[in-house]
Image: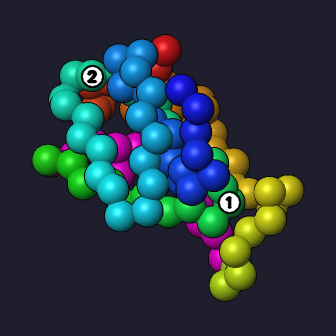
Amino acid sequence: MLLSEHTVLKVVIDGNEVATTVGEATFVPAGTKWSFESESVYSRAYIFANGGGIGEILTSVGSKYESVAVPQPSEEGKWDESKLSGLESVFEFTVA
């Protein structure tokens, strides 16, 4: 799939790539294998989940960004993958 210059989030759901742009929403059913990647340092995603889930996972493995400015690629926050594997049993997911 060719991504347009306006793509801000690339989502892969059960092997199918979806290019989500400004103002669009993408639905990922429970129990589905998925991944996402930001195409820009300026992108933003809002995640809504029924009950505990991806929001809690991302805040658990990420780090707080203290600056008021948009981070440069070299300043991006890192996440701790070891914390992610520790949450698999809590939130019933599998890291592939």
Label 1 close to label 2 by CB (< 8 Å): no
Magenta residues, as a range?
A: 51-66
Does residue 70 belong to the magenta stretch? no
Which residue in the protein does label 2 denote? Answer: 32
Q: Position of residue 72 (x, y in %)?
A: 80, 65
Q: Position of residue 54 (x, y in %)?
A: 34, 44
Q: How many marks?
A: 2
Residue type at tag 2: Thr
Residue located at (43% from left, 62% from top):
22
Q: Element under label 1?
A: loop
Residue located at (58% from left, 32% from top):
2
Residue type at tag 1: Val
Does residue 63 belong to the magenta stretch? yes
Q: Is residue 19 left or right of residue 73?
A: left
Q: Is residue 58 left or right of residue 73?
A: left
Q: Does 77 sit above or below residue 65?
A: above
- Residue 94 quadrant: top left
Report, in whole angstroms, how far the alpha carbon at label 1 lies from the one at label 2. 26 Å
**Dot 2 surroundings within 10 Å: few (below 14), some, or many (20 or more)?**
few
Residue located at (45% from left, 27% from top):
17
Q: Can the viewer see residue 18 in this picture?
A: yes
Q: Position of residue 47 (x, y in %)?
A: 32, 54
Q: Position of residue 93 (x, y in %)?
A: 32, 23
Residue located at (24% from left, 41% from top):
27
Q: Can the viewer see residue 58 in this picture?
A: no
Which residue in the protein does label 1 denote? Answer: 41
